[in-house]
Amino acid sequence: MSETPAFHDNRVEELAEQVRALSAKVDDLTAQLRSLGASRTEMVELPQLDRTSPHAPAHDKAAVSAPIVLSNIALVSFLLVVALVLRTVADNGIVNRELGAMLGAGYAFALIAYGFLRQRRRPVRSVVVVSSAALLSFSIALETHVRFGFPSSPLAYAMLGLTLITVTAYGLRAKNAFPIWIGVLGASLTGIVMDFPHPRFDCMAVLVVLTAWDSYAAIRLPKARGLVWYSLILTLVFWALWTTKVRFALAHGLQTGPGLSLPWLAPAITVMAAGYVVMVLVSVLSEAWSYRKFEACAPVANAVGFYAVMRWVVLPWTGDHGMVQAAVAVAAGVYLVIAAVLAARDKLRHAHAVTGFTLGAAGLVCVSSWAAVGNSAVEVGVWSLSAMFVWLLSVRWRNHDVRAISHLWQTYTCVTAPVWARFWAVPATQTTVCISAALSALCVAQFVRIRRAAPKPAAGLCERLDPADRLAILVLFAGLAYGFVTIRAALYLAIVTLGNAGEIVFQSAQTVTINGCALGLGIIGLRRENRETLAAALIVAGVGAVKVFGYDLTHTAGVPLVISVFSFGVMAAIGSFIWGQWQRRTADTGARPQTDRLDG
């Protein structure tokens, strides 16, 4: 059978299509091989990079860094040689010592100027030159002042301060923290050693202020944040040393000469305290950055140092108690106003600074209000109402740390009330009874308010440590303590007519009051299904047990003792029933009772 021409034409077309498809595949494979070859070429050429390139491997950098280190060591050696030549010229009398000291200082500042000029072209070498020049300047100021008395103390401290300022300016320009560390540490330590143990406190105060401000100016550099903590600690140590020296001189009737600089103490401390407040405010109000740990701690340390100086130096020196207390009260008010303003601007972002200023204000009020008011019972009322006011602010600011401060403040007031106000003394005054009754009602109402409608805090360390606000139980205990003071005073007035037997009856009545309070708390806790109230009842019951078996059995007798033991037995029996009901309810429901509400 012969094949037709049409068949052959179709066959040729099919073969042509196959040839074109194979050609396309060959082209694709060729392109892939070319790209693979280019990659292999790049991989082969990669190790041939310049060893001085910043993209060189780590071992090449290490190999290159060794000559750099050796060259910098040689540079420092040559700089030191020139300084030693100048010292030798001065020691051999070729020039007098004053001129030699001036030449050495001029040489050090010339090196710093050279570092400024070469900072962009040779950054590493300029850092070495400036740091070496700073150390040289500090050593010249120390040695010449200690050995020859030239320059004088003010000029020597001025030389330290000028060196510190120039080195800090260079470090900020170069964005390098190392020269600033050298400047801050060198200037402060040299200033301390220069006239030890009798430094010029007025000159040292200026140097401490410069150290603090230069440390704060470098806070944005990655490796310079530790400087602010060093400067803060240095400031507190300087305050303590100056305060101790002046207080010792005043207590022993010694002369306060130019070294102690007593007239400059209060202004210097005020400037330093105001400076740290400004530092925190600048850090907080800056939109670009914020250092929260410093914002929280600096105001507290500042307040402690300021009060210590005012209380232990300014007061013995002036004898004006009202002026000192007014200054402390003004400082506390300023702290609280700053906290309110910062909280109004941004509750979340400024939470750490708000906490620091509030804690500082609370401390200043607590340590100064008793002397400012003059009446011990009124003092307790001022403390307690201040703590309640801070609690209201914490609710408004939604700051859990401030709320914890208010609870601790209320507890401090209650614990120290027997010491300062003699709340436990009988017969109590009418003022004490009225204040204790009012504080008892307010504290209990505050606790109920906290548990009924406690807003969820949005910021603060205690938000993580105490999210359920367990510290609020301290407010309840404070209210119970104030209530006991009121009832105790009423009981004493009721049974004072019994004569000699009145003391035994009085002790028994107090025991019955404690046991009755524990029983009442247990009933309220069971009815409201509130675990905290039951825990408070258990603690008060423990106090009642100690009162009965630790005091009444040995100091009372007769019917009053029987009533005391009977009241404890009744409280224990009903408490056992309450505990059983509590366990039964929790077992039946299988759910944990509410601990943050008291409205049922």
Image: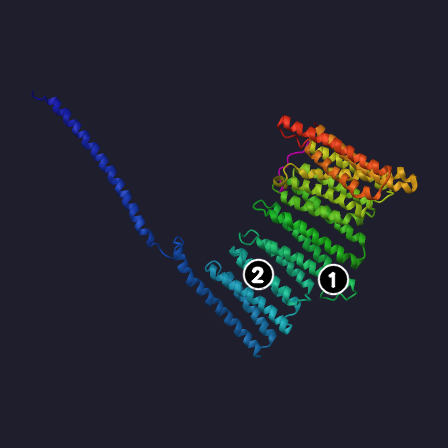
Label 2: how many residues lie within 10 Å, few (<14), some (14-19) or many (20+)?
many
Question: N-terminal of the two: label 1 or label 2?
Answer: 2
Query: Observer-nearest residue: 466 or 351?
Result: 466
Q: Is residue 583 magenta?
A: no
Image position of 26 (left or right of 203): left
Q: Residue at x 69, y 43 (%)?
A: 405
Residue 519 visible in this rendered orientation of the protein: yes
Q: Return the residue found at the far bottom.
A: 93
Q: Residue at x 30, y 50 (%)?
A: 44
The kind of residue on which mark 2 rests is Gly
Q: For the N terminus, give its image quadrant.
A: top left
Between 565 and 153, the one nearer to me in the picture:
565
Q: Residue furthest left?
A: 1
Q: Amino acid at mark 1?
A: Val
Q: Position of residue 255 (x, y in %)?
A: 77, 66
In magenta, the rendered stretch is 453-461
The residue located at (58%, 66%) in the rendering is 138
Give the percent coordinates (x, y) of residue 446.
Answer: 73, 35
Kindly identify which numbered label has been placed on residue 246.
1
